[in-house]
């Protein structure tokens, strides 16, 4: 490959204009970025160019890599799990990352970049987050074979501008894509609905349904029906799969057992889906869908009406995790339409069969009267008609007659003939009734289809909102409700059902009834009730509401009893209380008309606790700042008094006090500044080859006063390699961990520090003899302004995490070693020897204890 030009030969506005023009034309799940790479190459130096986007379900990243082959740029596509990706790290700290690798790239995507990993010849990388507001779409990655390619600040500013335009344009494309997806889904449902209300035969309707699902949602689909006589499944229609292989799979002897996802669905009459059938231990028989058809995700929905089960709608995707909860709900709309189609088709076919049977009987009667046929000729005629019309042998027809007529031994032959005449007369009336009922069913189907279209559109909007607001990628942890314009709930997800304590797929319950069980536990119940009652009022100005929900009911009263004068019997707050944020979103159609509302309920208990802790600790920090300033001010004021003569000893004490308090103040101010730099993403590392043992002893020397009489025991792996880190920043990590250990260890206790290299990672441990860290607090203690004791200021451990993660490492806390109390703080950072290969590990040995 040839390296791109070393410098920006185009002006920034020209580059931005080209980026906007090219990217705005990009569409599809695998967009072609080769044109963009060709346009940027003269202005930005790179040998490998990548665009990494977070997949819509936030469970994987889509990676496009562009590289030069000859005189042209070629694009390579792949995707890998979100966990362990570079995007996962960028979501936590969305800042530009520039790195140099003298020995070349050698590491996983989480370290080297999702698009750049796997190109060891690269020596310099630049990874820029693609952000729109606070939303991170993915990353823009550049790689060059030349060292220090991206050290120029002017070049970085140009790339930042390109990233901003690229992110904005991609978001516009994605939003447009969402509209297209919704339109595609609506058209597919309309196609299915039109088939239902037409006179098409059942196979044609099945074909319409599977084709509509495949087109609308980009999945393979099939409809299988249950043959009760043969106790097997039959493939009726499919799209996107090999019909011969699929037919063979569903004819498997164990397909109707719980070990198969289809059989489990039919036996329990409940929909089931598997995010990866290849490894799903619940359905071992269904592993064949992966080995034979290459499908990972499978969703099966039973086709049931009343007590009758007809079969199942089967949907498959070659991607793992292909069915999110909301997508499953949209798919259930198609399944409902398929069930209606089967039921309606069977009724129509039954009516046709009855009419044909009556016509045949009438034809036989006329033929016998005209031709005066004898019994044998009549027998031959009946046998031929039975075989042509019903595909049955005459013996089968006689067996049917015997089952339904000859068993009525109590009747005389005249009674039987009389009954047949009455049935014939009644059949005409019955046919008219059924025709009227059929017209009513068609009208109902049309209404159902229209409601399904509207519901699918609302769910699509809810899906978009959840992607923007959910904190855990790929999961719906918050409660979501969809309501019609009258304020009646039409959809609840699983967390919503857990929150309210009711289970409801769809219905017409008012919102205040949905939350009836929650109101007695709500401390501001009167305020919540008003919010719920006014929710669907277009003129209401209240968008958000914070609620405090107790663990147990406060009062046993009806919702209508919660008026403005209501007050709880319990205290205003308790440690077990949960804090929730209610947010109201209006939903508009493409014409801008209001069509629904969405309610989002998020648990913000941790946020509220953090706010309280931050307030308390900010007061503590303010006190820590004022105390040394007061001491310094008092000492200096005393020394400046001209009418007082201080002897040399007292003057020296004043100066020592000023010096000590100044050091204390400097440490605190530096910590605040460092934390601000980390939170703003402005922490710039100045890496060099360092001796990690020397860094530790430098930190230990600075922490001498804090350690007091505590003993520091070191266990270092011999011959530790030099590491490329920021000396000052890593020394700060050691200092803060030692200070934390000293604060939680007894005066004459031991603090153990270990250092070793394992699998290319430097691992450091600082073990104290304190009371340990409760498991539920082990993540929180690394947050800014969060501390478990009154002595800490909530900065030290947060700074440690920021510095370690800036080195592409991790830090955490775990229980102390076995048979020893205390906490063990562990951090790892990548370590590469000068040759670029990970440092080899060696057996650890214990060094002499140090005072």
Image (cartoon, rainbow, N blue to C red):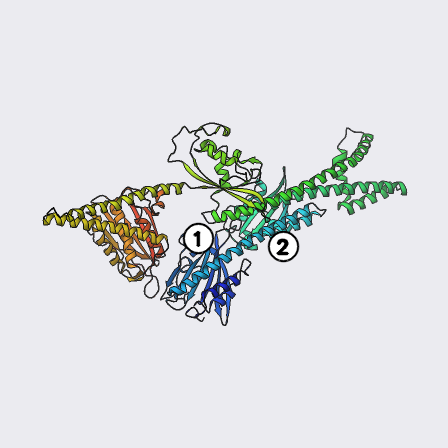
Furthest-front residue in this view = 643
Q: Would residue 749 be visible to someone looking at this image? A: no
Tally of numbered discs = 2
For marks 1 and 2, give the one nearer the viewer. Answer: 1
Mark 1–mark 2 Cα distance, whole angstroms, equals 37 Å
> Which structural element holds mark 1?
loop
Q: Is residue 153 above or below residue 779?
A: below
Q: Position of residue 399 (x, y in %)?
A: 75, 39
Mark 1 residue crowding within 10 angstroms, few (<14) / some (14–19) / many (20+) = some
Task: Decide which of 254, 72 is in the foreground and name it.
Answer: 72
Give the residue pinned by disc 1.
83
Q: Is residue 567 above or below residue 580?
A: above
Task: Decide which of 244, 153 is in the foreground and name it.
Answer: 153
Task: Decide which of 22, 779 is in the foreground and name it.
Answer: 22
Q: Indicate the quadrant containing the N terminus: top left, top right, bottom left or bottom right.
A: bottom left
Which residue is pictured at 88% across the width and 42% down the height?
373
Give the residue pinned by disc 2.
244
Q: Position of residue 328 (x, y in %)?
A: 55, 46
> Which structural element holds mark 2?
helix
Corner quadrant of residue 627: top left
Instruction: Give residue 753's mark.
Output: none
Task: Decide which of 752, 267 is in the foreground and name it.
Answer: 752
């Amino acid at each position: 490959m040839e390296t791109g030009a070393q410098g920006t030969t185009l002006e920034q506005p020209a580059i931005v204009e080209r980026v906007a023009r090219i990217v705005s034309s990009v569409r599809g799940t695998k967009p072609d970025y080769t044109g963009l790479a060709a346009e940027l190459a003269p202005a930005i130096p790179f040998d490998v160019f990548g665009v990494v986007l977070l997949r819509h379900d936030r469970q994987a990243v889509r990676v496009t890599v562009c590289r030069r082959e000859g005189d042209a740029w070629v694009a390579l596509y792949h995707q890998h799990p979100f966990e362990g990706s570079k995007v996962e790290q960028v979501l936590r700290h969305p800042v530009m990352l520039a790195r140099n690798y003298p020995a070349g790239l050698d590491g996983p995507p989480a370290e080297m970049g999702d698009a750049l990993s796997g190109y060891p010849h690269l020596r310099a990388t630049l990874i820029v987050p693609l952000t729109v507001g606070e939303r991170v779409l993915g990353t823009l990655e550049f790689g060059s074979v030349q060292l220090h390619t991206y050290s120029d600040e002017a070049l970085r500013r140009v790339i930042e501008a390109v990233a901003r335009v690229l992110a904005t344009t991609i978001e516009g494309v994605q939003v447009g894509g969402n509209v297209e997806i919704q339109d595609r889904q609506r058209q597919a449902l309309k196609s299915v609905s039109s088939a239902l209300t037409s006179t098409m035969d059942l196979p044609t309707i099945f074909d319409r349904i599977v084709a509509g699902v495949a087109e609308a949602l980009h999945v393979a689909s099939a409809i299988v029906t249950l043959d009760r006589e043969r106790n097997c499944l039959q493939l009726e229609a499919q799209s996107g799969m090999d019909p011969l292989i699929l037919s063979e799979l569903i004819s498997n002897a164990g397909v109707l057992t719980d070990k198969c996802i289809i059989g489990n669905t039919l036996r329990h009459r409940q929909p089931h889906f598997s995010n990866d059938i290849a490894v799903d231990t619940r359905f071992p028989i269904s592993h064949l869908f992966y080995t034979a058809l290459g499908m990972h995700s499978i969703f099966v929905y039973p086709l049931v009406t009343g007590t009758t089960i007809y079969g199942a709608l089967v949907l498959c995707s070659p991607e793992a995790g292909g069915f999110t909860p909301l997508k499953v709900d949209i798919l259930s709309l198609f399944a409902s339409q398929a069930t209606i189609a089967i039921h309606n088709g069977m009724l129509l076919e039954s009516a046709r069969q009855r009419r044909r049977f009556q016509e045949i009987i009438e034809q036989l009667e006329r033929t016998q009267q005209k031709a005066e046929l004898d019994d044998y000729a009549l027998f031959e005629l009946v046998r031929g008609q039975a075989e042509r019309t019903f595909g049955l042998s005459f013996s089968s027809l006689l067996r049917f007659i015997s089952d339904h007529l000859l068993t009525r031994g109590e009747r005389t032959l005249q009674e039987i003939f009389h009954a047949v005449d009455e049935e014939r007369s009644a059949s005409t009336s019955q046919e008219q009734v059924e025709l009227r009922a059929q017209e009513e069913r068609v009208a109902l189907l049309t209404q159902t289809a229209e409601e399904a279209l509207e519901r699918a559109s609302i769910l699509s909007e809810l899906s978009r909102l959840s992607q923007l607001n959910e904190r855990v990628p790929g999961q719906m942890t918050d409660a979501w409700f969809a309501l019609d314009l009258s304020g009646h709930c039409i959809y609840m997800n699983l967390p919503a059902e857990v929150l309210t304590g009711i289970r409801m797929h769809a219905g017409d319950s008012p919102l205040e009834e949905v939350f009836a069980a929650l109101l007695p536990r709500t401390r501001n119940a009167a305020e919540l009730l008003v919010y719920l009652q006014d929710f669907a009022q277009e003129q209401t100005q209240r968008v958000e509401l914070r609620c405090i929900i107790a663990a147990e009911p406060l009062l046993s009263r009806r919702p209508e009893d919660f008026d403005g004068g209501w007050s709880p019997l319990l205290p205003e707050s308790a440690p077990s209380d949960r804090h929730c944020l209610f947010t109201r979103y209006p939903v508009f159609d493409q014409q801008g008309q209001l069509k629904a509302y969405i309610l989002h309920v998020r648990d913000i208990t941790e946020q509220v606790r953090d706010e309280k802790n931050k307030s308390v600790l900010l007061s503590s920090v303010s006190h820590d700042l004022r105390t040394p300033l007061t001491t310094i001010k008092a000492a200096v004021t005393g020394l400046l008094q001209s009418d007082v003569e201080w002897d040399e000893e007292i003057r020296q004490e004043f100066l020592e006090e000023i010096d000590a308090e100044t050091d204390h103040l400097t440490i605190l101010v530096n910590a605040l500044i460092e934390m601000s730099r980390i939170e703003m993403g402005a922490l710039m590392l100045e890496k060099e080859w360092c001796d990690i043992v020397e860094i530790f002893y430098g930190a230990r020397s600075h922490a001498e006063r804090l350690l007091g009489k505590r003993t520091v025991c070191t266990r270092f792996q011999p011959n530790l390699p030099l590491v490329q880190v920021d000396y000052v920043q890593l020394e700060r990590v050691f200092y803060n961990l030692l200070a934390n250990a000293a604060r939680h260890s007894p005066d004459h206790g031991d603090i153990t520090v270990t250092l070793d290299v394992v699998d290319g990672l430097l691992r450091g441990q600082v073990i104290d003899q304190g009371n340990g860290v409760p498991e539920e607090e082990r993540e929180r203690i690394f947050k800014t302004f969060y501390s478990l004791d009154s002595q800490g200021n909530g900065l030290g451990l947060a700074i440690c995490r920021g510095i370690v993660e800036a080195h592409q490492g991790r830090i955490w806390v775990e229980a102390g070693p076995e048979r020893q109390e205390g906490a063990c703080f562990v951090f790892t950072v990548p370590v590469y020897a000068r040759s670029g290969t990970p440092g080899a590990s060696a057996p650890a040995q214990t060094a002499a204890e140090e005072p």
